[in-house]
Amino acid sequence: MKYFSRKILFIVGLIVLSFFSCESGNMLVKSRSVMDVNVPDYKKKVISVMKFEDRSIGTKKYRSWSMGIPDRIMEGLGAIPYYKVISREYIVKQVLKEQEFQLLGATDSNSAVELCNLLNAHYIVIGSFQVFRNTLQITAKVLSVKTGQILQQTSAAGILDNFYTLQNRISLNIAAKMNIKLTKEAKFKLVERYDTKNLDASLANYRGEEKLEEIALLKKQKKKKELKKKKEEAKREFKKAIKLDSNYEKARKNLSKAGLGIPMTL
């Protein structure tokens, strides 16, 4: 009987451990580290990146980068072992759980602080971007969740076709201004990271990701008719992204999610 009880407890323990491992995996951005250094968890800064505001004048073409630019900044910060970066998937999951639906589009500091209190983050990154002719400018601010104060501000500007490099420079600048020491090799690796260099493929993928978030919300609200339509729209965008860049792995994974009807929160 004792052996049986111990066996049951062991199995239950494995199930609980598996559950928390899964939660942790969904919670944090997973990126290949740019430095081979072991940083204890208690020394890592927990940071979250909100959607950015599109301040481009006279065009809505780049609107999906409101999600895309923060996503790439998250990936960049996630590659620095001194950070724990809360994933967009987890943000959506918590917003839906708390039914604070308006926070899905949070870009201002007050909404960002409110959202990050739900996430137990220490720091928030908010920002904006603007495309003018052939130039992209990105501006980001890092705020303390505890006080709501702006701790630092940084920006990067350059040729539009170099959008992926500019996004990475924001991650690099944030780390530098938070006194995180990176080797020259790590800085090089960080700046050179990309998921696609094709501008239109990137925009299409993030239009699709916007629709995945809408799908998660519609599912929560049980709006089946709108859900089906939005799912098809998302699939079209991901297919377009893959057609423009056949090596765009992120778009392929997103297409798989949309095809299986899996919202991005799972």
Image (spheres, rainbow, N blue to C red):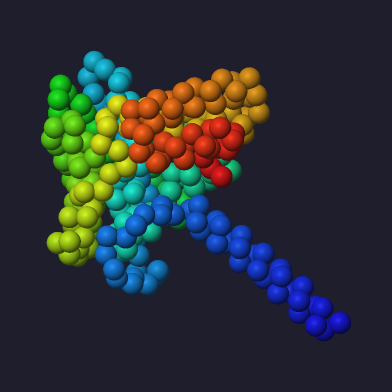
The residue at 17%/64% (across/down) is 183
- The picture quadrant where one finds residue 177 is bottom left
Question: Which quadrant: the N terminus?
Answer: bottom right
Q: In the rendering, at what x and y percent does residue 210 appear?
A: 44, 30
Where is 138 relative to 48, above or below? above
Question: Which quadrant: the C terminus?
Answer: top right
Where is 253 relative to 148, above or below? above
201 and 49: which is toward the camera = 201
Q: How many marks?
A: 0
The residue at 36%/54% (across/down) is 31
Q: In the rendering, at what x and y percent does residue 70 appear?
A: 33, 41
Q: Is residue 7 left or right of residue 15?
A: right
The residue at 26%/17% (across/down) is 59
66 and 38: which is toward the camera = 38
Q: In the rendering, at what x and y percent does residue 106 appear?
A: 40, 36
Q: Residue furthest right?
A: 1
Q: Residue furthest front?
A: 246
Task: Say if residue 125 shows up in the picture.
Answer: no
Task: Say if residue 88 shows up in the picture.
Answer: yes
- The picture quadrant where one finds residue 57 is top left
Q: In the rendering, at what x and y percent does residue 8 appear?
A: 77, 73
The residue at 41%/54% (across/down) is 30
Q: Is residue 29 left or right of residue 80?
A: right
